[in-house]
Amino acid sequence: MAEQSMGLRERKKRQTAMRIWRSALDLFLERGYDKVSVAEIAAAADVSKMTVFNYFGTKEDVLLGPMEEHVSDAADAVRERAPGESAVAALRRQFLVKVAERDPSIGLSGDARLLQMRQLISDTPALARRMLTFQMRSVELLAEVLAEETGDRLLAGVAAHQLVAARGAVILENHRRLVAGDTVEEMADDCAALAERAFDLVEKGLQGYPGNA
């Protein structure tokens, strides 16, 4: 939802949540995830500890909440696709839009702090496990959409795993290049081309799945 379309209360809630997240990220990057308490996050954000828990259920949620918002992206793309459009085509189209928008959720962000955050997640077992849970949930949500449409849970699961894996491989390459020092603008065209290749490879196997009922 665009901020200008929100009411005053919703804007204030989002601003508070963002202040908590930024404060937490600063502390995590400075001292490490395990050495920061929720009470310290609350103090840095100038809110109460209870307010932090009202916005985020756990300390993990404080950092990973913005990423969790994208768990349903693949399922949403397929559910909302045009009549006659394949699942592969829908995910390809959604991904290319995100490339054009330089969307941080697919690793296209020049913000050095976000890159540091990705490294922090990789170096912190609890956060890395949570990210793996996000990926599996993304597969499950997509499989549910495909199974509802086709009635075949097995092939829906196979397709969902392939689609999410292709998407994830391109995102992983984006992160690798950012770590290597490439800029977002240098990467964008290559990212679009890689996405085309990745989804083309999956499409050859799925061959237009699911077909029209």
Image (cartoon, helix red, strand yellow):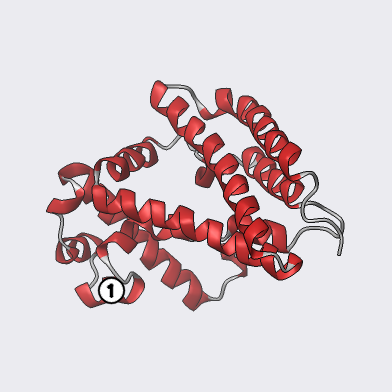
Residue at the outermost left position: 35
Depicted 108 relative to depicted 177: above or below: below
Q: Nearer the viewer, residue 190 or 166?
A: 166
For disc 1, the marked residue is 53
CA neighbours of label 1 inside 10 A, class few (<14), some (14 to 19), many (20+): some
The structure residue drawn at horizontal position 67% and vertical position 56%, both measured from the top left corner, is: 155
Q: Residue 71: in sight, yes or no?
A: no
x then y, percent, for residue 185: 57, 27
The structure residue drawn at horizontal position 55% and vertical position 56%, both measured from the top left corner, is: 139
Q: Quadrant of the N terminus?
A: bottom right
Q: Secondary structure at mark 1?
A: helix
x then y, percent, for residue 37: 15, 61
The structure residue drawn at horizontal position 56% and vertical position 61%, both measured from the top left corner, is: 72
Q: Nearer the viewer, residue 169 or 73?
A: 169
Q: How many marks?
A: 1
The structure residue drawn at horizontal position 28% and vertical position 42%, both measured from the top left corner, is: 120
Q: Quadrant of the C terminus?
A: bottom right
Q: Quadrant of residue 165?
A: top right
Q: Residue 82: in sight, yes or no?
A: yes
Q: Nearer the viewer, residue 203 or 75?
A: 203
Q: Quadrant of residue 55?
A: bottom left
- Under mark 1, the amino acid is Phe
x then y, percent, for residue 129: 32, 52
Depicted 44 relative to depicted 184: above or below: below
Q: Is residue 82 left or right of residue 151?
A: right
x then y, percent, for residue 81: 77, 58
Q: Is residue 197 left or right of residue 113?
A: right
